[in-house]
Image (cartoon, rainbow, N blue to C red):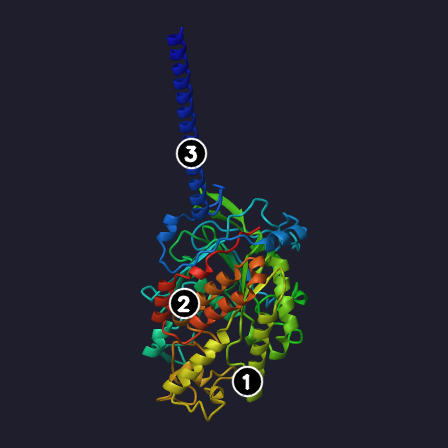
């Protein structure tokens, strides 16, 4: 009996030991599965913007295919979510009539360069508020890449503003103008091409110079060689584009030309190029054109299956004040404030990149020059002191950059005494009935100059418009850099406002400067913008 009892006890102990070992093994196996799940989730968070397969995502592999210059932006913005809760969005499926037949209003057209075009509808114009897509959109991102000019811009979408080298003539085959390449020093500054990848919806508002920058932006997002759809809704002065949209997969860029400030009093007034109200500074705008942009549909081939989307709202406005059409006393702090808020109400934008004014043919006297500098100081203060929860404003100090370029050109190429002669910029070419170009802005040399002509440079076409073949890369790089700064969340903006402003300052110090392009590109390769990484989700 004792032997049998001992055997039974040993058997029970062995069974308990076996069960214990099995329990330990199961526990370790479950812990292993849990750790694997956690690792997978963490990697998914870093590599993919959205869980929704209906939206395109950017994977780490795709990111590595870009140059190491891009700055990635993907964090949540509470600002838009709060704004969307407060606003009463309404969808309006009404269609809109063509422009009234006004000799100054231009013509409404729909043109495409590659695929399908939107159609112009025929019912009465209706003004509605901006609607927001019902689904959650993928996180916003913007990458930009800097190249030394192995592939400069073709100015494909701006044929009237090309700076062709050699001798060119006017439409009648008269008035020859000779234009030469930039000197080595300026070439080393301008030797940069910028390309941009983003899913932001970007709207350019401004005059013909604003449209110049926009048309280079269209190239920078791949509008020339990618499968795109480009629609022109309105032309002015013949075939000069004033309302247009171009899409490259999820990237949307649109142009809204104005000859005055975007103000409520300009509603239903003649659109470009009829001219602004010189008393108020308001430019004419048509609700029909606003709705044509917001209701514009486009396809995103990067998704599986291909999806169709409607613009419905814009994220960013690139704002060029149409100084060429306005007197300086209409460019006031109050009007700028009204313009920014109206852009938010009409188009939904919550990021604005605002340019300072550059010296041009409108500045004719020393009094004009003083008022011009005072207006730019006001614009800088306006941006610095802006404190509005729904819109972030960044300053693109284009005016200061032009001042530096013109000063260098006058001193080194034209041999002007820029120290003793305070009004050197006011010396003009003769024989122009209107807007004679400044020698310091437009001329490459004063040798063989007559009262009416000089050999032109490749900075400015005519003293008002710019040679985007030369200047476009740095302007777009500064713009992309500023958009990156602006994508800081509302919470981070209030906690780190100094970082927000220092980021803006760095963008201007790098690109709106006379630093050689090679120095900037080397720095961007080295630093890879690690301090600017994370940004917004659109609500």
- Tell whether 326 sits left or right of 307: right
Residue 324 percent coordinates (x, y): 55, 76
Q: Is residue 186 visible?
A: yes
- Residue in the image at 63% along x and 79% along y: 329
Check residue 211 in the rendering and tell me which mark sits there, or answer none: none
Q: Earlier in the sequence, mark 3 or mark 1?
A: 3
Q: Which image quadrant for residue 521?
A: bottom left
Q: CA distance from mark 3 to mark 2?
A: 51 Å
List the residue tagged with mark 3. Answer: 33
Number of residue marks: 3
| Quarter containing the N terminus | top left
List the residue tagged with mark 2. Answer: 473
Residue 123 percent coordinates (x, y): 64, 51
Residue 179 percent coordinates (x, y): 36, 78
Label 1 neighbour load within 10 Å: few <14, some 14-19, many 20+ = some
- Residue in the image at 38% along x and 69% along y: 520
Residue 314 percent coordinates (x, y): 56, 56
Of the pair 369 and 469, the residue shown nearer to us: 369
- Residue in the image at 43% along x and 87% along y: 452
* CB-based contact (under 8 Å), mark 1 and mark 2: no
Element on which disc 1 rests: helix
Which residue appears farthest toward the front when viewing the image? 2
Element on which disc 2 rests: helix
Label 3 neighbour load within 10 Å: few <14, some 14-19, many 20+ = few
Label 2 neighbour load within 10 Å: few <14, some 14-19, many 20+ = many
Check residue 369 in the rendering and tell me which mark sits there, or answer none: 1
Q: Earlier in the sequence, mark 1 or mark 2?
A: 1
């Amino acid at each position: 009996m004792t032997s049998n009892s001992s055997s039974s006890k040993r058997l029970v102990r062995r069974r308990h030991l076996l069960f214990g070992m099995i329990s330990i093994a199961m526990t370790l196996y479950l812990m292993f599965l849990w750790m694997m799940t956690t690792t997978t989730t963490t990697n998914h968070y870093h590599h993919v913007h959205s869980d929704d397969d209906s939206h395109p995502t950017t994977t780490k592999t795709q990111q590595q295919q870009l140059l190491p210059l891009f700055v990635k932006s993907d964090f949540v913005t509470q600002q838009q979510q709060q704004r969307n809760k407060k606003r009463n969005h309404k969808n309006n499926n009404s269609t809109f009539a063509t422009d009234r037949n006004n000799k100054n209003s231009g013509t409404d057209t729909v043109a495409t360069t590659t695929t399908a075009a939107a159609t112009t509808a025929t019912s009465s114009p209706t003004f509605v508020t901006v609607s927001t897509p019902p689904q959650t959109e993928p996180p916003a991102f913007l990458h930009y890449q800097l190249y030394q000019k192995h592939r400069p811009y073709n100015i494909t979408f701006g044929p009237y503003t090309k700076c062709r080298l050699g001798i060119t003539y006017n439409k009648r085959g008269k008035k020859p103008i000779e234009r030469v390449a930039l000197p080595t020093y300026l070439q080393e500054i301008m030797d940069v091409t910028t390309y941009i990848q983003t899913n932001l919806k970007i709207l350019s508002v401004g005059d013909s110079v604003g449209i110049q920058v926009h048309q280079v932006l269209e190239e920078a997002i791949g509008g020339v060689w990618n499968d795109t759809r480009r629609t022109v809704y309105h032309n002015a002065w013949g075939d000069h584009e004033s309302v247009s949209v171009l899409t490259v997969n999820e990237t949307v860029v649109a142009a809204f030309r104005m000859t005055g400030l975007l103000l409520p009093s300009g509603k239903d007034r003649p659109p470009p190029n009829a001219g602004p109200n010189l008393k108020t500074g308001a430019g004419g705008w048509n609700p029909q054109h606003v709705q044509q942009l917001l209701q514009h549909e486009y396809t995103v081939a990067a998704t599986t299956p291909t999806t169709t989307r409607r613009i419905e709202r814009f994220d960013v406005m690139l704002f060029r004040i149409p100084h060429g059409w306005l007197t300086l006393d209409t460019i006031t702090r109050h009007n700028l404030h009204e313009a920014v808020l109206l852009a938010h109400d009409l188009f939904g934008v919550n990021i604005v990149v605002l340019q300072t004014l550059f010296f041009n043919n409108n500045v004719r006297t020393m009094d004009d020059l003083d008022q011009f500098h005072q207006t730019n100081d006001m614009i800088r203060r306006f941006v610095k002191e802006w404190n509005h929860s729904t819109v972030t404003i960044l300053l693109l100090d284009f005016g200061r950059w032009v001042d530096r370029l013109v000063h260098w050109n006058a001193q080194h190429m034209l041999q002007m005494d820029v120290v003793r002669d305070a009004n050197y910029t006011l010396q003009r070419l003769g024989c122009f009935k209107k807007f004679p170009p400044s020698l310091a802005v437009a001329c490459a040399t004063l040798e063989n100059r007559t009262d009416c002509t000089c050999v032109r440079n490749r900075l400015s076409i005519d003293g008002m418009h710019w040679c985007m073949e030369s200047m476009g890369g740095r302007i777009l790089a500064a713009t992309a850099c500023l958009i990156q700064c602006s994508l800081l969340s509302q919470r981070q903006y209030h906690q780190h406002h100094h970082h927000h402003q220092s980021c803006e300052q760095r963008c201007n110090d790098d690109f709106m400067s006379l630093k050689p392009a090679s120095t900037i590109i080397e720095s961007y390769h080295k630093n890879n913008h690690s301090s600017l990484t994370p940004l917004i989700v659109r609500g």
